[in-house]
Image (cartoon, rainbow, N blue to C red):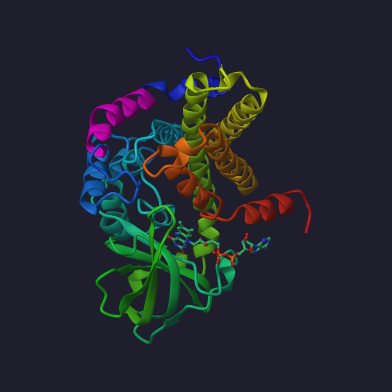
């Protein structure tokens, strides 16, 4: 058993984590062998296979109740699965766990019909969705939305506006669109084949992500398209607080896993590579990269796991998730950078895992709220500003 400080908090969900790691090793690593070395987005049909297979084995949306198709596991177990996916270094492992295209906590607040029609296929991995929140002039400041939702005489809605940087819009079955109603920001379900919902510009991210613009050109929707029914009108960002905390902790866990993987590569390389007649790991400047990384990764893991456990106890303090996400994402960026330094040119070559991670990890300080926004949340909780 590991004697690392974080192992104190890790051992509890060992069985499910071991089973997931075995699934990754036996089934996903061989499937990933044929993927391009550049680490670009795997094909949609392969991602769909991984999702549904993982759901059938009980990993995909494991914290959802069994009656919805999940495994009824605590959130802290899910956080550890995301950690294990990042640590595996297998490019398919993250797709085996529900992310921003999977079951949305907003839909947990949905009506019975919405849960059956939209949430359950997401939990089973049979459908994916996208979240259209960001706008050209409303990114971090999500309360500044200008897309409108206007109530019609028949009780239906008319949505107009533009959304940017929407992940998975090119593959999703439906979109969760947040638009401003008279009562405040409101979340709607919009089928992707709606005739007035158009995909506009495509943005290609630095590590192969595809983001899209969504144009809402007078999208007419029935009254029951509001997530949560009448109670959901004006409540999208309020209900989202819970979902944001969980989403941030999942990102933190992925970052910790990636950092641990990058650190392992750095340590292995430093033990073998020779320079000036010595193994480079014997040089203190190299040790500094790896030892600082070790200390920071352990701290980030402990913080993330402790916050996830608090969520399981019903404590949803947004500043906790912000602390974990800020610490873990900034740590992962630093650790990947340091490990690449330890590898010299070898880590910089296209096809090396660190070359991909260097590009991939950078988005972690932007998604689910930038690092600056996490600091804003923490500062507010400290009574500042
Ligand atoms: C890979 C990826 C996937 C994404 N997926 C989605 C998606 O599926 N759906 C979706 O709706 N959006 C998505 N986004 C958009 C993402 O949510 C926004 O990029 C993010 O919220 C930041 O908004 P912005 O880019 O407009 O930056 P801005 O809000 O314009 O911020 C620019 C800079 O100013 C800083 N800043 C802003 N306000 C403050 C403040 N009050 N105090 C201090 N600093 C501040 C920011 O931290 C940042 O450094 C995605 C983005 C990326 C990169």
Does the magenta segment cover residue 43? Answer: no
Furthest residue toward front = 276
Point out residue 117 in the picture as x, y percentages from the top left corner: 26, 58
User: Which quadrant of the rendered structure holds the C terminus?
Assistant: bottom right
Identify which residue is drawn at 50% across, 72% down. 135
State the image quarter where residue 168 is shown.
Answer: bottom left
Point out residue 12 in the picture as x, y percentages from the top left corner: 47, 22
Q: Nearer the viewer, residue 250 or 91?
A: 91
Point out residue 189 in the picture as x, y percentages from the top left corner: 35, 66
Q: Is residue 373 above or below residue 137?
A: above
Q: Is residue 312 visible?
A: no
Q: Is residue 94 visible?
A: yes
Identify which residue is drawn at 28% across, 29% down. 23
Quadrant containing ligand 1 reads bottom right
In the visual, does 348 lie left or right of 96?
right
Q: Is residue 110 above or below residue 256?
A: below
Furthest residue toward bottom = 153
Chief secondary structure of the magenta span?
helix
Furthest residue toward right = 384
State the image quarter where residue 33 is shown.
Answer: top left
Q: Is residue 189 above or below residue 39?
A: below
| Total tally of numbered discs in the picture | 0
Furthest residue toward top = 1
Point out residue 102 in the picture as x, y percentages from the top left corner: 35, 51
Does the magenta segment cover residue 30? Answer: yes
Tell me the magenta residue range: 16-32
Identify which residue is drawn at 53% across, 23% down. 270
């Amino acid at each position: 058993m590991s004697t690392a400080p974080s192992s104190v908090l890790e051992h509890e969900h060992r069985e499910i984590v071991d089973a997931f790691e075995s699934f990754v090793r036996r089934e996903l690593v061989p499937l990933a062998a044929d993927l391009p070395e550049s680490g670009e987005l795997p094909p949609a049909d392969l991602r769909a296979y991984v999702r549904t297979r993982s759901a059938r084995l009980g990993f995909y949306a494991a914290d959802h109740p069994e009656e919805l198709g999940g495994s009824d596991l605590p959130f802290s177990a899910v956080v550890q699965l995301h950690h294990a996916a990042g640590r595996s270094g297998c490019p398919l492992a993250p797709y085996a766990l529900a992310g921003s295209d999977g079951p949305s906590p907003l839909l947990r607040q949905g009506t019975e019909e919405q849960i059956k029609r939209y949430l359950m296929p997401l939990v089973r991995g049979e459908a994916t969705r996208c979240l259209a929140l960001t706008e050209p002039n409303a990114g971090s400041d999500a309360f500044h939305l200008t897309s409108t939702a206007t109530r019609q005489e028949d009780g239906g809605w008319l949505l107009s506006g533009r959304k940017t940087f929407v992940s998975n819009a090119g593959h999703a079955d439906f979109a969760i669109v947040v638009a401003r109603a008279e009562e405040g920001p409101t979340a709607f379900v919009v089928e992707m084949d709606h005739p007035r919902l158009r995909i506009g510009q495509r943005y290609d991210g630095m590590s192969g992500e595809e983001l899209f613009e969504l144009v809402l050109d007078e999208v007419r929707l029935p009254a029951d398209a509001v997530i949560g029914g009448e109670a959901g009108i004006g409540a999208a960002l309020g209900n989202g607080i819970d979902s944001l905390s969980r989403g941030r902790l999942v990102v933190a866990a992925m970052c910790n896993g990636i950092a641990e993987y990058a650190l392992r590569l750095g340590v292995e390389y430093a033990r073998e590579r020779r320079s000036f007649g010595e193994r480079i790991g014997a040089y203190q400047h190299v040790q500094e990269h790896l030892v600082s990384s070790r200390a920071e990764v352990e701290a980030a893991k402990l913080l993330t796991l402790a916050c996830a456990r608090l969520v399981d106890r019903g404590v949803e303090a947004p500043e906790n998730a912000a602390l974990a996400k800020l610490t873990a994402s900034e740590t992962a960026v630093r650790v990947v950078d340091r490990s690449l330094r330890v590898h010299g040119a070898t880590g910089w070559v296209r096809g090396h895992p660190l070359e991909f991670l260097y590009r991939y990890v950078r988005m972690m300080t932007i998604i689910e709220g930038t690092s600056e926004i996490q600091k804003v949340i923490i500062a507010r909780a400290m009574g500042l500003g």
